[in-house]
Image (tube, grey):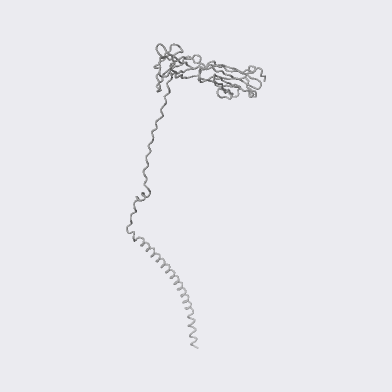
Amino acid sequence: MIVTDLKLQISEIPTHIAAGEQTRVEASLSNRGKLVERQAFLRLIDVRAEASGAEDTRSLPLNDLGEDGDEKAGDGRYAMRFGEQQAGQEVELVVAVDSPTFMREKRFRLVVHEPVAVAVTESPDGPVLTADVQPAVMQPGAMVTAWQEDAGGKRVPLQLVQPEPDRWTAPLKDLVSTSYVKVSGTTRLGNLTERTVGPLMLPGVELPPPVAEAPPVIEPVPVPEPEPVAPVAEAVAELPAAPEVEGQGWLIPAILFGVFNLTLLIGVGVWFFLMKTRGAESDELDLEQLIETQVSAPNAEESQPRENAA
């Protein structure tokens, strides 16, 4: 790509901007009138922006990522949203493109305005508040309201009149309360804005010190006193005595006597069972002997007559 005809293109930058609003800033490179969007070339450059005021200089985030003011990522158009919160200062905006072989840069100057300029002055009829809507940054049709606020935070609305198209005035209720003005409308850049200016006092009159809110009084929560605990010895002494059982004196001997008799009966039963078993065995033995005797007896009788016959 031939870079001898590279130009830095910047979107229109306003020379006046309202405090608190933002404007979109877009930067791009063109070569022979055509937008440079070739990514291989864009990766070699650095697109940056800076804002310089009376007190500091800060870097601004120009990007081609499709965010923070940039409409489409990777299209070669770098964008951001720029704004200032404080009025009354002139800002220099610098947009530059750097690369190893070339550099392009553009500078712009912007003035930051309050949407409404407010002043408290003396007049033959007493102190007067004047509010001038700034036509450099505000479109016609803005709404203006004003009030005074005492040290306790109570608001008293002021009756505004419009002697000129962009001017409102109102007499003050007193010299001690602070004054405030709020403006609502559309800026020259097409942004809706709502801005409050204040607190304001007459020249030479100091602002009242802020009323420190008294910390809330936290009443201590009463803690019930614990009931006194009697000593262990006294608690045991206070336990009711176990009721005496009628006839308790002869109950234990009767139980022992019953156990002894039961044991004796069981022993006698066991002894009787053993003796009976032995008796049954003896009976069986005598019966067998008797049967043998009965069997052998006829033989003995038969042999006896034979001996007599002889």
The quarter of the displayed image where residue 220 is located: top left
Depth check: give the residue in front, 304 or 182: 182
As drawn, which residue projects farthest toward the left? Answer: 246
Depth check: give the residue in front, 70 or 231: 231
The quarter of the displayed image where residue 126 is located: top left
Q: Is residue 310 above or below residue 62?
A: below
Question: Is 34 positioned to the left or the right of 305 in the image?
Answer: right
Which quarter of the image is occupied by the N terminus? top right
Q: Is residue 238 above or below residue 91?
A: below
As drawn, which residue projects farthest toward the right? Answer: 2
Depth check: give the residue in front, 168 or 149: 149
Q: Position of residue 241 (x, y in %)?
A: 34, 53
Question: Is 240 positioned to the left or the right of 36 in the image?
Answer: left
Count how many numbered circles sit on residues in the image.
0
Q: Position of residue 240 (x, y in %)?
A: 34, 51
Q: Is residue 7 above or below residue 268?
A: above
Q: Position of residue 151 (x, y in %)?
A: 40, 22
Depth check: give the residue in front, 169 or 36: 169
Q: Position of residue 66 (x, y in %)?
A: 57, 24
